[in-house]
Amino acid sequence: MSRPNYDPQAIEAARQEAWQQRGDFEAPQPQEGQARVYVKPSSPFTSGNLHMGHVRDYSIGDSYARFRRGRGDAVLFGFGFDAFGLPAELAAIERQEPPADWVAQCGERMLGQMKRLGFSFDYDRVFYSSDEAQYRWSQWLFVTLLARDLIYRADTTVDWCDTCQTTLASIQVEDGRCWRCHNEVRLIRRPTWFLRITPYLEENDRNVERLQSGGNWDELSLATQRYILGRADGIELDLEGGDGRSLTVFTPHRKFAGAASFVVLSPRHPEVDEWATDPAAREELERMRSGGWDRSARDAHSVPLVDTGASIAGPGGEELPVVVSPIVDARFGPTAALGIPAVDEADRDIAERLERVEVPVSDDGEEGEAPAATPVEGARETTCYRANDFSISRQRSWGTPIPVILCEQCGPVPVPDEDLPVVLPRDLKPTGEGNPLAERPDFVDVECPKCGAAAKRETDTLDCHFDALWLWVPAAVPPEARDEQMFSHPDLQEWLPAERLVAGNDSGGFVFDQRIVTKALRDIGPFSFIEDGEPFAGCLFHEMVIADGRKMSKHLGNVVNPDELVAENGADTVRMAVLYAAGPAKTLNWSDGAVRFASRFLRNLWNYTHDRAAAIEGLSHDPEAAADTEHMRDRLRKWCENGLARITADIEQLQMHKAVRNITRLLERIQDYEKRVLQRRGELDRADAEAQLAALVLLARTLLPFAPHTAEELLVALGVEDSAGALEAWPEEVDIPVQPSASPASP
Ligand SMILES: [Zn+2]
Ligand SMILES: [Zn+2]
């Protein structure tokens, strides 16, 4: 019998057809005593194309999901699209079509790519955040949090992008630039809706230690949570102005509070207007708030600074100038801080710009010499967090309508639950300017639910960051139950918290806020069963995929297209290559070398396995000869045991690059075993070959999570039954026949 060709396209199409027909990846109803494993991948924007970062993300998540299924655990591997927001809106503007149409096309295309790559999602559970049935619950969440005062409307300064004509959450501002268009962002004043996260910062902080000791959060993900929190430990003290005004100030420099030479207030500090009373200072402050603050000016040399002209008595009674600067926000949150140039470099830079302050330390090489400690009486230990409430409303049309009616008599009135969803007009065609919702009388003009007077709907929509707060929930609810029971279905208690989140390292902000809102929903009721308020029991963040040492971009012409790679090499090769090329904590600098390596490995394994499976037919068993090589079969068994233990441990820790490496090593061992037997006796006894085939079965089983199509086809060729249960079973132990008596006698 001639060996079949390794034809990835044909093999993969056949296996995918079988998976779909059998419904292999539908999330099961967990059985008593069965471990429940919800693997949550990142939720892609409906951009229309998977990029290599997605391939990396889903290849890690998929191999883990397949591994856990193989161990007999109940696995939910589901996701939905983050379909609202600017990317889709801008693409729709460019193409002059309704965003809803664009999103539907993109989603379909991306699902096709995912299926072609063989990712074992429960595709029946896929959802779009822009579906009415879905955003109805974003609106429910808004109203629910509003009733608990965790959402509020405030006339305040917000980050504004001129290009995108929208306000931005602080998380969307990267180094003073817009996350989307990379243009500089400025600060303006307007009424906006805020999510109040401050009540849960301390608990998020506390829990990070626990998540770390649990061992299922990797270093990268923990580091993002600490960074976003921005914890600063120090002291606070109350300063008295001579005129009855007082101010509570913070400093991280406990021992040197007495050496303070000015006080710096955040422009968002609630009492800032009381200090900027001088007309000139007031004007400057207004300018800072309404656009004068160029957000790229982050460092202390160039950050905006307003000297209020006012002073306050310092800890030692000396007069300290009071200044206003957003540098406080960037360091400690919207608070007031002591400026201590003697020990703090940023404060020294500020002091140099303040004519009223003497700079105590010159820059003439005396660095490292700490001044004498000057602690003060009456200081209280305290902790500041840089993370703060953020704006969740945007002046864009492709988003969840905010379920609020603005009435002149009653103020903002939430839309009653029975009137949800507030439907976004489906035929809405954004132009890229202003907010088209505001120009639609059929949307805007309504009656006030409270007093019945003519009123207007809020025309801001929710930032897709708000939708993302609960984007990890819907996959856990059967699609047919989502209308009624999105936050109350009994399955939520089966699947939540998610056993593992696998996402790119730019997801830290999403995860941080998801952790906040879980705690809020625990306290409100629906998630009372998640006692610690943590949505993810484990978390793996991976770095991005780059090419030629640079970020992939159309502009640089270095984008690697997954479709082309798959068409040329097959999905298994691409999946293996992307896993093999780098550990998750490392940036993956794409090269064809990894593809060549994976392709060669799979082809070699295919040929080798088929050849050995065919050759055994012609071998006979001679007890004496078999006894002579028993120690070799025993060594093969040990190699297999060793390899299996390593690969299992690697996958448990989601270190897939190590697992793939250990699988390739195992093949080398199996080939080495054959070579040694041949060196000793010139040919294999049937017992030797049976041991070898058993080792190849083991190898194919460990390969299955990574290259599932090829591995399944090999298992079938080796005589394993062609059913999901028989194929995907993870080997818990090694079964290599060592004793010749264990093998049936040959004719
Ligand atoms: Zn922008
Ligand atoms: Zn009213």
Image (cartoon, rainbow, N blue to C red):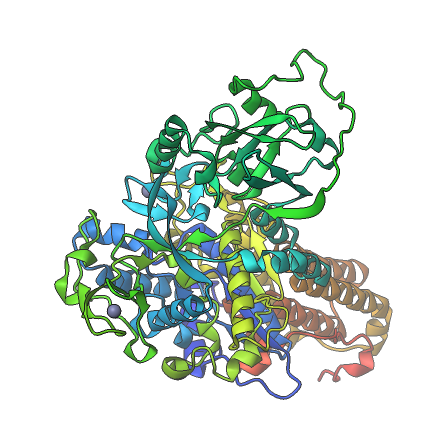
Q: Residue furthest front?
A: 243
Q: Is the residue 554 above or below the residue 678 in the image? A: above
Q: Is residue 695 visible?
A: yes
Q: Residue furthest bottom?
A: 32
Q: Is the residue 426 above or below the residue 385 in the image? A: below
Residue in front for this viewpoint, 461 or 478: 461
The x, y position of residue 304, in whole percent, is 44, 29
The x, y position of residue 521, in whole percent, is 51, 71
Q: Residue 288 occupies which quadrant of the picture?
A: top left
The x, y position of residue 648, in whole percent, is 69, 65
Q: Residue 286 occupies which quadrant of the picture?
A: top left
Dividing the image into four quarters, tell me where ligand 2 lies: bottom left
The residue lying at 40 percent from left, 77 percent from top is 124
**36 lies left or right of 42:** right
Query: From the image, which quarter does the C terminus lie in?
Result: bottom right
The residue lying at 48 percent from left, 33 percent from top is 325
The residue lying at 76 percent from left, 20 percent from top is 369
Q: Is residue 659 visible?
A: no
Q: Residue furthest top?
A: 364
The x, y position of residue 682, in whole percent, is 76, 62
**521 lies left or right of 440:** right
Q: Residue 128 occupies which quadrant of the picture?
A: bottom left
**29 lies left or right of 113:** right
Residue in front for this viewpoint, 468 or 434: 434
